[in-house]
Structure formats: C-alpha cells, structure tokens
Amino acid sequence: MRKKLSLYLLVLSLATLCFGQLNAATLNIHNGGDPSSLDPHKLSGDWENRIAGDIFEGLVTEDIGAEAIPGQAESWTISDDGLVYTFKLRDGISWTDGKPVTAGDFEFALKRLMDPAAAAKYAYLQYPIKNAEAINGGKIKDLNELGVKAIDDKTLEITLEKPTPYFIGALTHYTAYPLPKHVLEAKGDDWVKIDNIVTNGPYKPTEWIPGSHVTTVKNDKYYAADQLAIDSAKFFVLEDETAALKRYRAGEFDILTDFPTDQYEWIKKNLPGQAQVAPFAGLYYYVVNNTKPPFDNADVRKALSMSINREVIGPQILGTGELPAYSWVPPGMANYSEPAYVSWKDLPYGEKVAEAKKLLSAAGYSKDKPLKLQLRYNTNENHKRIAVAIAAMWKPLGVEVELYNTETKVHYDEITKGILEVARAGWLADYNDADNFLNLLKSDVNYNYGRFKNADYDALIDKGNATTDKDERAKLFRQAEQLALDESAAMPIYYYLARNIVSPKVKGYENNAFDIHRTRWMSKED
Amino acid sequence: MIRYAFNRLLTTIPVLWIAITICFFVLRMAPGGPFDGERPLPEAVKANLAAHYNFDKPLIEQYFIYISDVVRGDLGPSFTTLDFTVSEQIAIGLPYTLILGGAAFFVSILLGVAAGVYGALNRDTYSDHVLAALILTGLVVPNFLVAPIFQLVFGLQLEWFPVGGWGDGSLRYLILPVAVLSLPHIARISRLTRGSMIEALNTNFIRTAHSKGLSDRAIVWRHALRPALMPVISYLGPAAGFLLTGSLVVESIFGIPGIGRYFINAALNRDYGMVLGTVVFYMVLIMLLNLIVDIFYAWLDPRVRTR
C-alpha cells in the first residue's frame, strides 16, 4: 500500500514537473501603446480594447470570430417594434471580489457613461439608447430618463430611441460593460487603481507599469474559468514595431498586433505562416472639400477619384496587398449585403485616365492651366508613400499637387474645421453595420470633413434607420451609398487589412473583420 | 557654501516660473488639442471633456489654476494615461530612468576617463589611433542605429542578452540599453580627458614632480589627472542631465518604462499637463546638477575656492 502511494506521489510530482510549464501558460502580447485607462468609459483605441475585453464582459461578448454571443446575459428578448430589449442575466456571475454582478451594475454603468460629468469619450456609441444623446449633451438633466432599467437583480430592460439592428453587436463594445457599483461608490475615481479595481471578465488585472506592460491573470470566479487555457496575459507597450519584431523572433512575444509593412516579404519568407493579414472593417480614403471651388464641381472630384490607380496601392506601394476600394462601405458588413460601387469600377485604367482628362478639361483645366491643389496627410511613412504615388497619378491630368503633412492632432483639428482641399482620412468600424460608414457623409456630423451636403442622402439614411425591415433598410442604405459615389463625395482608396503575427505555439486565433481576438479562446503550447 | 547653494536655489524660482508661463501659453497656441484624433468626437462629448478638465474656462483662469496647483506640488492630470497623474507617472518612470541613466553615467566616466588617460599616455601610437577610431564611431553613429544593431547581434544572433524589456530588472536586461546610452558619452569624455591630460602632462608642476623623482604612476593618478578632469567635470553636468531624464530612443526601442519618452510623446499628444510636468522636472534637475557641478569644481580646483 505504502509502495503504491509513493509510486503515485512520484508520478504526480513528475507530472507536475512536466506539465508545470503548461499549467502556467502566459501569453505575451505586443500591444503597441499604453492604455489610457482601465476604466472602460475612458477608452477609445483597439489596444485598449484588447485589455478591457479580457478583464470585463458585457451582456454579450465576442466569440472566436468576433461575432456576438451571450456573455453576462444568458438570453434576451426583443419587442416586436424593435425598441425594448429584455436581458436575463446568467446565474453565478460575480465580480472578482465575490459580489454578484447584477442588472443594477449595468444600469449604473450606462447611466455613468451618459453622465456629462463622467466625460466618457466614446459615449456616443450607445446613443441608440433612449434619451442617451440628450442626457450626454446636457439637454436632459435627470439620468433616470435614460432607457435602461434593472427590473430585478437578474433582469435588465433597455429601451431604444429607434429600432437599431446592430444594437446587440454594439453591446459587445466596452462602453456597455457593467461597472462594480459598490466599488465606485466606495472609492470614487480611485476605483480604477490597480489595487482597487474589481472586474467581471475572464481575467483580472494585477499589474500595470506605464510604458512597460499590463498583466492580467485568470479570474477563478469567471463562469467559464475552467475553460481558460491561458493563465496570464501580458500586454506589452512598445511602439517601435521593428524592435517588437526582433523580440518576437527571440521568443519574448507570442503575438504582434502589427508589423512593419516594409518587412512583409521578409516575414513571409522567414516566418512562414505566422503573418496573419486579413480584411478589416475599415476604409482608407481621401476627402475633397465639397464647398470650395473648383472641388464643388462633382466632375472635378470624379476626375481626381477616377485617376487614382487603386490596384497598385495595396500590392506595390504598401506591399501588404490591401484591396482597392470602389465602394464606401467595406464588403461584408452585417445587415448589408454587397455594397454599392462606383460606376467606373471595371473600366481599364487607361480609359479611366482618358475620361478623367476629359472631365478636367471640360472644367477648364489642362496642362497649360493646371489644377493646383494641396493634399494634406498626417505624418506617417505609409500616408506619405500613398500621397506621393497619387500625386504622380494625377500629374498626367495636369494636376499640380502640393503635399502638406502635419502631426496627427493638427491634421484632424484642421480638417474637422474644414480647412482642406484634399486630405487623407481613415475609418475603422465601431460596430458591424453599414450605417457606421454612411454616417461619415451625413451633412450634420463634424467628421464629414469634406462637407458633402446632400438632402437626399440624409433622407435616405434617416428613412433607413427608421424602418424595422432589415432588407428595406439595406436597400435604402445602398441607394444612399450609390448616390454619394455618383456624386464623388469622397474618394475611397483601399480597405484596411488587419496585420498580426501569431506564433505557431498559439492556438485558437482566428482572423476576423474586427481584429478582435480574446485571450479567452486561445491556448499556448510549449 | 551652504548660503551660496541656498541663494542659487532661490534664483531658480523666478526662472522656473517664467519657463512654466511661456510653456503654458505656447502650448495652447499650438493647433490641435488633447482630444483631437483619428476619431473625431461629437460636440457634446467634446464639451463634456472640456468641462471636465476646465478647458471651458478662460485661458488666464486655467493658468492660475495650474500655477496654484504646481505651487502645492500637484502637476495635475495627464490626458493620455488617465489612471495616473503627471506626478505619479514621473514617480513610476523615474526609478527606471535613474537606474539606466545612473549606470550609463558611471560606465561613461569609468571607460571614458580610462580610455582618455590611456590615449594620452600612449599618444600617437598604433593603439591610440585604433582607440580614437573606435571612439569616433561611437560618437557619430546615432543611437537609433546602434540600438537595433545591438539587439540584432547580441540579442537575436548571439543570444547573450534579452532583446528588450525590463524583465525582473536584472543585469542582463540592463547591459544593452546601458551600452547604447553610454557610447557617445564614453567617446566625448575620453576625447576631453585625452586632450586635457596631454596638456596637464606638459605643465610646469608635473615637470617639477618628475624632477622630484616621483613615480610615473603617482604623477599620472595623483597630480595630472585632477586638473585634467576639469573640462570633463563641466561636461558631466549636462551629461547627467541628459542621462537622468532618459532617452526616448533607448526607451522606446528597448521597451523600458522610463520617463524619457514623455518628453516627446506628451508634446505630440498635446498632453498639456505632462508637457509642463516634464518641463518643471527637467528644469529643476538641470539647475540642481549645475549647482552640484559648481560645488564639485570648488572642491577640485583650489583656484576656484580662493576666489
């Protein structure tokens, strides 16, 4: 008996020796910049989302392919008019301090999100909720007017302003995470300090050294804790991508969330199968000042847009093969089938240039009387390469381009004020819906940099958003998109790609259009 | 001496105040604000943020709020890393910078002086020329080039050291960044030492020492080195200032959480609080270091003392 026992102990200790490493799997992620906060209401970047989404969980969460699946809520019902969502919370959900997560925590969090005093940057993402915009804008003072109500500890009711087909998707966003009411009330603004913070996601933060890393470890109280293969994740701050690639090669990082595009060929050859380049719901585009002559002439805008040889930009100028954009909404957005395309999409490039020349000369421009324009971009090597290439493509048309670059803050400050002729911009989808891109050209938004103003366009979008019929909505949206493209409101250039490098040791990583890869689904072999 | 130091410190206060004032207003004149970015915010959200950080108040009122906070030792909030105040961020980053900069400082003095003395004593020999060439290389190759090369050679290929990071703070993580940081300083210090050492060796008192029959070693180390170090000492003030405020390049390439990166990033991010915070910090440091250098001077050179 004793012999058996000691043999058993020996096997056990050997097993611990062998698998000890495996048991303590740490995922080292190169995360780019420092998060600005661990408070979900203070975030705005994808590098912050990676951490926030590991430590918090909303009513719904992302699956391995970034599709919405039940999170803290186990199920929900939607009223027939599409306005009232009733969520039933899962049993056995709790904060890391052991207190249960209640519907009240969600109500509290959403009210705080909209409270002007909290100054949440991204509050507008939940504006579909009833009275949210009015409260956030200070027009309604009473937070209780917000369309969010905890019926009891397990039931949450959210009322919307109007039917919003993407609302469930928007709830995966960090602006919709619950907050530990009891901790915020006890600690105030200090609740978010690493020693005080209490979270409800699969992981909890244990360390944050600004400029170095954030460490999270498995949250044993998480309802699916037994399915987590990664015990700890480290999110490293390192803005130098070349240095990050070296550290990856030395085995110090398991995942790189970006890489230097000029080394793509080298990476493909030397790290085969490790670069993950996948379509990303984002658009790289140029805006044209629709109010300033001669750019108020749609033909001038069309000529400029047509003569951009989009096919060479991804493969040759960037080197990572970004797909040329001829639509305003990237393909594959939810609640929208194929986007609308510019009418001249399939013309051979030579014919496009010939047509563009004709349009410009009709507008009174030629080699002798060149169209002079200023092209603005924010300082960045890739933006510069593209600007130089596009200036060269416009040259045969007799367009003289002055390149003008400023740092990002100045660039956006000025183009938001409408100070531009032609300027570079980009948009990454906040939520999986075409509406997100179409809004960029609505006449009442400040990020419609080119000041495209078309009453029919606005009416189509508004009408689409007012209907509960998803097909009808998509149809109206597509009409709007076609209208904007026919008017050459702006110039789509390419659809973004997500660029990651993932070690072959890491399993459970799946490319998706939102480039969201929760640690929860991953595992790491030794 | 103490009185002298105290007076010197007092004069720094108006200088500091002028610098903060200029910096405060110049920063606000720069286009773009901390909340401008790739993703423009709705007006309502912008207004909420402005109210939260007092940006909606007249600039002059904001200025007085800031100054009164600084007087109380509060450098205010940071707009990029919201969970930490400016003072907290400097306090967290400073130890890393101090360890790195301090190590680089001593390595620079040690190797720089040693190489300089060696060069002076073996003037115009083959080894002096080789050393000079090496030093010149250290001086002219910028650290943003040296750092990746060191990472590639010593980190990736030879696998002697980690490519980056601070790890547990052990020596092996320090060696590469310290080497990169100290290279140009070793070069400068050795050139300074070599030049003034040669000069010192030709002075009358050294000749007297020789004729007294002192050993070469005693002459070099006890008599020639002290005066030879004077120009080095005056270089050390700014060098220490440079090293102790961290290096953007070294920190961002090696991923070290020091304060060097704040100097540039804060300005780019229009992180007003952080820019002013680093300015205040840097000025205080430079003034203190200059003071120390002056005191050191007096100690080293009897002529300064009697003046």
Image: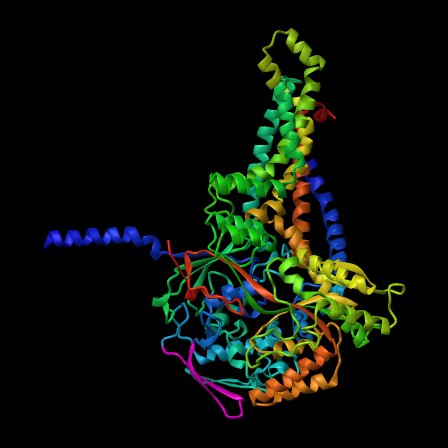
Residue A58 position within the rendered picture, expressed as x and y whole percent measured from the top left: 47, 74
| Figure label count | 0
Q: Is residue A74 magenta?
A: yes
Q: Which quarter shows the N terminus of chain B?
A: top right
Kindly tell me whether residue A113 is visible in this rendering. Answer: yes
Dominant secondary-structure state across the stretch colored magenta: strand
Q: Nearer the viewer, residue A99 or A169?
A: A169
Up the image or down, A218 lies above or below A80; here it is above
Q: To which quarter of the image does residue B50 belong?
A: bottom right
- Magenta residues span A72-91
Task: Name which residue lies at 57% across and 58% down.
Answer: A33
Residue A247 position within the rendered picture, expressed as x and y whole percent measured from the top left: 51, 49
Q: Nearer the viewer, residue A97 or A481?
A: A481
Q: Left or right: A68 with respect to B144?
A: left
Q: Residue furthest left?
A: A1
Q: Which quarter shows the C terminus of chain B?
A: top right
Residue A152 position within the rendered picture, expressed as x and y whole percent measured from the top left: 43, 85
Task: Name which residue lies at 9% across and 55% down.
Answer: A1
Q: Nearer the viewer, residue A348 or A82?
A: A348
